[in-house]
Image: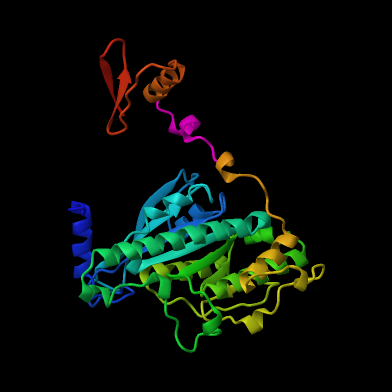
Amino acid sequence: ITDTLWDLAAAEVQNRNSNTSEDHGGGDGAVSQRTVFIVGSKTGGKTSILLRCLDRDEATKPTLALEYTFGRRARGHNTPKDIAHLWELGGGNSLSDLVQIPITPLSIRSLSLILVLDLSQPSRLWRTMETLLQAAHTQLGKACSQTQAHAGAKHKASSFQPAARVLPKDYPDRELLSPFPVPLLIIGSKYDLFLELESDKRKVISKTLRFIGHYYAASLIFTSTKSELQMSKTKSFFNHLAFGLERGKSVSFDSSKLLVIPSGSDSFIQIGSPPTSDVDIGSLHAKSPLDLWKKVYESVFPPESISENKELKDPAKDPQYSEPQVDSMRAQKDQVGPGVHQLYITTAWRLQPARGSDYIIIPV
């Protein structure tokens, strides 16, 4: 038997939920539970946006790795509160392997993804978008395969298929798109700093993100946490994903203004061709429309070569996470010479090597 007890339990829950609606809206009196996974640019304002959307007046701290919180909202008077499970990935691209924690066989049926891109750092924008979407897409495929592996033939016929998200027949450019497997919201953050860029550069960024949003059948909105009006529009998109509320009717395509584009509102004709004044498109030898936009974008904003893995601070040396007993043990460990046998257990306890064969147990 290769299945673990956890695998069997997960399969049982999935089977019980197989007849529920795909959007997990819940029937009358039923509690809806959705999962929203927030990823994006390092120091791009993800935590600030999340707290504002939850109406929480809290001081923001850098997200160390992967953090979880939840939100609750009642649909009406004397009704159960719906629950939104909220995950936030820190570190930009450097911790993309952690997508496997929020994206599981149990979460994919009610999962949405929010990608926050720092508009004030255009040279990092494309790589951040590309890396994180690819990591999420790959994990969604794995989660779907795991779901099917533990399901019977009856459940397979109705199981969630991330690789084949179906768009309405009247969706603009339906046959030319590559819909992201789950609902996707792209947020361009720090719009106030974005306005300080040259108008030509702002146009390139805006048109490129419009193309990306439409190509993946995503919604797109620019925002700044310094503007109540902009955050109210962002909050309506967030509540749509987290609680199934109406998204609002505000729409704006003007690249000289704040972009607010719900999925299905844009089209390639409206977006137009890539903005190239100094580049011959024919000389770029692009393999696909997405590759063409990437080459044009990177001709204007060459990607930085700095590794985010090197930029990420070592949390063990961060003063805000100091633990005197653990830190002193770590210092002793670093001083131990080669050839000395050591045993360390990372659980609720840590074992500190002492002289001889004894160990000192230090609670953490």
**Residue 254 vs residue 23, the one in the foreground:** 23
271 left or right of 215 in image: right
Residue shown at the point (75%, 72%) measured from the top left: 281
- Is residue 316 inside the magenta stretch? yes
How is the structure coloured here?
rainbow
Instruction: Please tell me how many numbered marks the rendered image carries.
Output: 0
The residue at the point 63 percent across, 77 percent down is 253
Q: Residue furthest right?
A: 278
Whether residue 199 sits left or right of residue 43 in the image: it is right
| Along the viewing direction, whichever of 288 and 185 lies nearer the viewer | 288
Q: Residue furthest bottom?
A: 170
How far across and down, in percent of the image, does residue 277 sit? Answer: 81, 70
Q: Position of residue 206 (x, y in %)?
A: 66, 69
Magenta stretch encompasses residue 230: no
Among the 4 quarters of the image, the one containing residue 188: bottom right
Q: Quadrant of the C terminus?
A: top left
Q: Is residue 278 above or below residue 318?
A: below
- Left or right relative to 155: residue 335: right
- Where does residue 261 sit, x and y in percent of width and height? 56, 75
Magenta range: 312-323
Q: Is residue 363 above or below residue 103?
A: above
Q: Is residue 125 visible?
A: yes
Residue plotted at (31% across, 14% down)? 354
Q: In the displayed image of the protein, which residue is found farthest to the front? A: 1
Q: Is residue 262 left or right of residue 159?
A: right
Residue 143 screen position, x and y as percent: 35, 61
The image quadrant of residue 74 is bottom left
The answer to whether residue 210 shows anywhere in this view is no
